[in-house]
Amino acid sequence: MSEKKQERVGVYVCHCGTNIAGTVDVVGLARWAGEKLKHLGVVVAREYKFMCSSLGQELIEKDIKELGLTRVVVAACSPHLHEKTFRTAAKNAGLNPYLVELASIREQVSWVHTDKAVATEKAKAVVAGAVSRVIENVPLEEIKVPINPDTLIVGGGIAGIQSALEIANAGFHVYLVEREPSIGGHMAQFDKTFPTLDCSACILTPRMVEAGTHPNITLMTWSEVVNVSGYVGSFHVTVKKKARFVNEELCTGCAICQEKCPKKVIDDVFEAGLGYRKAIYIPFAQAVPKFPVMDKENCTYFIKGTCKACEKFCPTGAIDFNQQDQYVDLDVGNIILATGYDLFDARRVSNYGYGRLPNVFTNLEFERLSNAAGPTSGNIVLRDGKTTPKSVGIIHCVGSRDKNFNNYCSVICCMQGLKFAHLVHERTGATVYNFYIDMRTAYKAYDEFYQRVLEEGTLFVRGKVAEVTDVARSEHEKGKLIIQVEDTLAGKQRRIPVDMVILSSGLQPRHDAKAVGKQFGISCSTDGWFTEKHPKLDPVATMTEGIYIAGCAQGPKDIPSSVAQGAAASARVLDKILQKEVALEPIKASVDHDKCSGCRICNGLCPFNAIAFIEDDQVSDINPALCQGCGTCVAACPAGAISGTGFSDEQIMAQIDGLLFLNLLPVEA
Amino acid sequence: MTAKPKFAMYWAASCGGCEIAVLNTHEKILDVDANFDVVFWPVAMDAKYKDVEAMEDGSILLTLFNGGIRNDENEHIAKLLRRKSKILVAFGSCANEGCIPGLANLSDSREIVHTAFNTISTDNPNQIYPRTSFDVPEGEIHIPNILPVLKTLDQVVDVDYYMPGCPPESHQIAAVIDLVVQVLQGKAELPPKGTVIGAGNSTVCDECKRTRNVKVIKSFERIYNMQIDPALCLLEQGIPCNGPATRSGCNARCPTAGAQCIGCYGPAEGVVDYGARLMTSFASVIDAKEPEEIENILDGLVDPTGQFYRFNLAGSLLKAGVPAWKKEKV
Amino acid sequence: MNKYLLYPGCSMESSAKAYMQSLNAILEPLDVQLEEIEDWNCCGATEYLGINLVPAYSLIARNLALATKQMNGTRTVVAPCSACYLNLAKADYYMRERPALDVKVNEALAAGGLQYKPGTLDVRHLIDVLVYDVGLDAIKEKVSRPLTGLKVAPYMGCMLPRPDYKHRWSDHEHPTELNDLLLALGAEVIDYPLTTSCCGGHMTQIGPETAFELIRRLVAGADERGAHLMATVCPMCQLNLDAYQGEMNGFFGTEYHMPVLFFTQLMGLAFGKDPDELGIGLELVSSRGALANIGVKVTQPESAGPRRKKEEGLPMPPRLNKRQAEKEAVR
Amino acid sequence: MTENFEPTIIGFTCNWCSYRAADLAGTARMKYAPNVRLIRLMCSGRLDPTFVLRALASGADGVMITGCHPGECHYIEQNYKALRRYLLLKRVLKGMGIEPERVKLVWASAAEGAKFASETTAFVEEIRKLGPLNWGKPSDQLPIISEPVQHEEVPA
């Protein structure tokens, strides 16, 4: 097949210093390619110390111009590193960038093999494969799509708020969608923030208010995204505004309804189950927006058909029992997901007794307990609501760094544990024990805080707690919670009786993270966190163009990092918006209508709904803008009527033959 | 035009259905006689190989060659006719892709002979097997030697045109005859070498009247086990219908009659491996994610190899008479 | 009709007769059929695996191999003893995990014309089968004499829920199977955090003092939480807590009286069976008083506590009383 | 024939997971068998059985297909299509007299460089045990029609 079109191919072998040359006979390889691959159209084969260097690139550009190369193969590192480099070089020399192929002889050969002869042979095969493939490459043009300047941000925690403000302040419109009645997220529940101990509400509230009043921000709380379609530049999103049963135009947020409502309900969202709210409620004083929501499941009127106390007392007649869920359609160009985290359910670690032993608390419960605006107005007391603990044990890594639950480190627990220790110490003077596996106090001013807490006299026991029990073995254990632990520094088992235990429950992906990921077309890691495009160099972008992630949705992190990511994500979005249009990789599938018989095999295969069936012509068709280029339909078409650019059947089969070229030699000889 | 151009038709390893299909063109066959001088057609008239050998190379204008290359006689005649003919047409599924005889490529040629001469279905108590040559008083007689695998025509000689079908539909044959006659009268051009003639470019579904929806296969059924909805796509009903991957041209005879397409027209234009297309498309629309579920559904496909390669085996990548890479160098 | 293969294990015929009796008594009402594995042998208990792996596993695997011969319709082997259950399950698991071991063990079995392919059988404990196959609802239905008013400490023992090779148990530290079952019988189940603590196992033979402390914790825990009696699912647990309770009391100078019954005995009672039929009264720490709470009369004579061998040879000083010793030390 | 036989294997990788896993194995300098030659696809869903057949027909002794773990596909769920095609393909290969074990499907995420390396080496050994595929052998083997093969019944 290849013989018929006479392409002029140039092969360039990179030494990568000794990275490749150390294990592959690069000179021999280049010579071999020049001689043995002539029949494929190789007209020049060179090797050079660093092909990616400007000199290396110039070498290629010069050959393209002077030798009139029509195809280029660079045998160097992984295409994920330098494909762009060499394609740009080709472009500069007037050759279509997609006529360049990289043969990975570093990651796939020199770095993973030791025997030079063997490595060189494999390198030859890899190069032969690339040459055969590149001949079948066709020139491609990037597809440009316009960017809608509006942005959707999902999740009104600190990360989402930050992103929203950055974009809004830059003068572009933002839709901020929040599931709960108010924005603020977990941070609004906290009392103090480490390491500076400034009050969480004090620093968060101004941001919330700013977001709530910003002319460029449309706040949609008590709302959820129910459908997403489209692609970078022009997403179409449907948001469900759950009925508040309160007319936001009329409501002044006076909270009289809440005051008059006779129905008390345990608030397991904001108060973490430690306090009560009414059936119609504003989750907390500084809530943004200030409008209350009615919780239909618990409202006496919705259950019994009578009551309507709220309606009676509302001065502005804002209560509307007939309000329905609304569905709002939005068009946006980019989307930032800042959906946050769920707390690990400490009951799963049954040997710590949470849910069984009253005076075992979770970290979130303690935040409310120590919060001046919390159910005990900041008094740190036992479950009975009055007794102040004389001794408190704080257990780290609950559900984290534990093969039985989550393998990862939840990042915040160490500092949080220290914060709790300080607060308990300061407010109750109780003896505080911290039970830790390792103390992790990286980042600015964190370790100093550790020192401070140490000096305050908090006791630290290094070891994973085996059990928290109320079974006393001796008199002085009676009526206490006994923490059984191996003190790995003292090298012995200890039983430490305390009045109160606080469990540093780890952070977990949202229970519905996978579903949300699917909805927005991004993937989750094995742990369930949203996967970033590159763990180091691209932490807020995702594999799906136009979808960004920020805050704990991407992995456990503290407030500073969440804020930083929020800002970073919006920076990426702004860059897209300002470019006005975005170039898409031209790796797309297309249907040959003459060959397509409309069997509709492919119709159900595209998760991006890029394939449509044209009833009139009885053929299937692919929308290039929606197509993500996976090639599944290409591989599935029974008639071979669908072809895919960049990875066409011809290219791949040619590459197969090329890779096996060496095996075929003896047969031909 | 003084003498009429010469026409030949030959059958190698085949069933004879192709010849019948030709005669089945009714009065069109007269056009053949009117426009051609039929020089060699073993089924229809008496002629000797030596007569053909005597002709000068390229003196036959058109040869329709049906049947696969099963033994050295087939191979010899294929090469002979190639030499003598201007236009050599691989006529019918056997010559194109091996067809049913090609299924023999699933077994060793010794097994085949053995099966033919010494299984319960054969009464051969003395285990008598044929010999390629044998001495009789009149001298040594020869019978053709069986080749290790059945080859398609183009695996042995260069082929000008391909005409698929088992057998090719008579209306298509008629059309082709028309075309050739027109060409002779200078009213039409011959299609480029290597073209598939007498068939469509798309697949059977194109001509199938059944309604089609998005495909979701929950199970594969055998057609005699179930009540078939006469209006709905068979594949959607779980019947493994080869239509989606099979070249159009037959007016979707089988599906229209309520039987699944078994693929006698072979792969669509440009397809490398017919069976692969069916495998991949069927598998793609199976409605299961768990390996066990999938296997259960696949159990419904009795003999997948036969299902996907009934006609195409000898022409397929893996069971081609010669390995694919050798073929390319031919 | 649920049909299973039964691996009774040594104790069911001796120290845990009551377990066997009560088990037989409840099979019929629950429509469960147990077919005993023919020519079964010792499971190696808790020690052998600690001494020599291959022979130990071979010893266990022999039972599995024999069981496979009898599996018509069922592939589930039921063991009423936690140690037996764990050993059988362990053998099956590790033979699959470590092909090398599989080979060695099967070589050994081959000597006896036997062989076992790991994974062939499903090894389960009795309570697992009763709770999850028969089902709590079915059990509830059969209750004719609810154990209302009887405060029971549910004691699962340490070997049953861990290691949990096939993720069978609700939890490894605080499994609820026994609680749920007892609740189904109408009993009042006390919160018993010690449910998976160790009963001392064979430490009673090796290091009695250690065993006594472990027994004390369990008994004391049940006593302090107001249990009338303890329910157990394992012959060894029952033996330790019952037979050594007296010695433990003597050792610590305590006076606990905590009857320990098999859960099957309580099921029998709830099903309205006669105490004798259930082997009630065979226990050394009499349950007479405890069962009086639900108006059950134990006819069998109260046994005189642990029967000691008649003293032979020269007299020896009594066992040192720890508390006493401490007091003296203070002075 | 099989002793010191070095299998040639074609490996298909997904651009988002297994290809990156291969890169990772490289950057981490993990060593694995050199017998596998990789082809990058955008997704295991692009894997057309034709490629596998072509590879086997063109002289490969085995084919390794790799993709993202189920539920982690970069294109949401296309790897399930690869799984289904793979399972069907194996059945067809069996029917053609080729050991289905010559084709293997391996899930490897971008983070699993080690897994990629070990799976590769393991597969090479599996193929080494199976021996060379020698495709096209039937056409080299000569027919001996006069001597019957020594078994009674052959499925015709």
Image (cartoon, coloured by chain):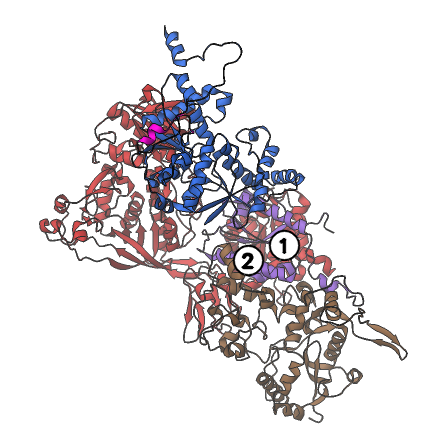
Image-based side of C252 in relation to C66, left or right:
left
- Pair 1/2: label in front: 2
Q: Which quadrant of the structure image shows residue C130?
A: top left
Residue D3 screen position, x and y as percent: 73, 48
Residue D75 screen position, x and y as percent: 45, 56
Say which of B152 and C303 sits in front: C303
Q: Distance between the residues labelled 1 and 2?
A: 15 Å
Q: Colour of chain D?
A: purple
Residue B285 screen position, x and y as percent: 48, 63
Whether residue C287 is in magenta: the answer is yes
The magenta segment: C280-292
From the rendered image, report the letter of the chain displayed in blue: C
Neighbor class of circle 1 (other Cα within 10 Å; few <14, some 14-19, many 20+) is: many
* Picture layout, residue A546 above or below residue A403: below
* Disc number for residue D62: 1
* Label 1: element kind: strand
Q: Most extreme residue toward the right, as rendered?
A: B137
Say which of B113 and B154 sits in front: B113
* Picture layout, residue B241 above or below residue B287: below
From the rendered image, report the letter of the chain displayed in brown: B
The answer to whether any part of residue D54 appears in the image is no
Q: Chain A is drawn in which colour?
A: red
- Residue at mark 2: D87
Please tell me whether the stretch drawn in magenta is mainly helix, strand or loop: loop
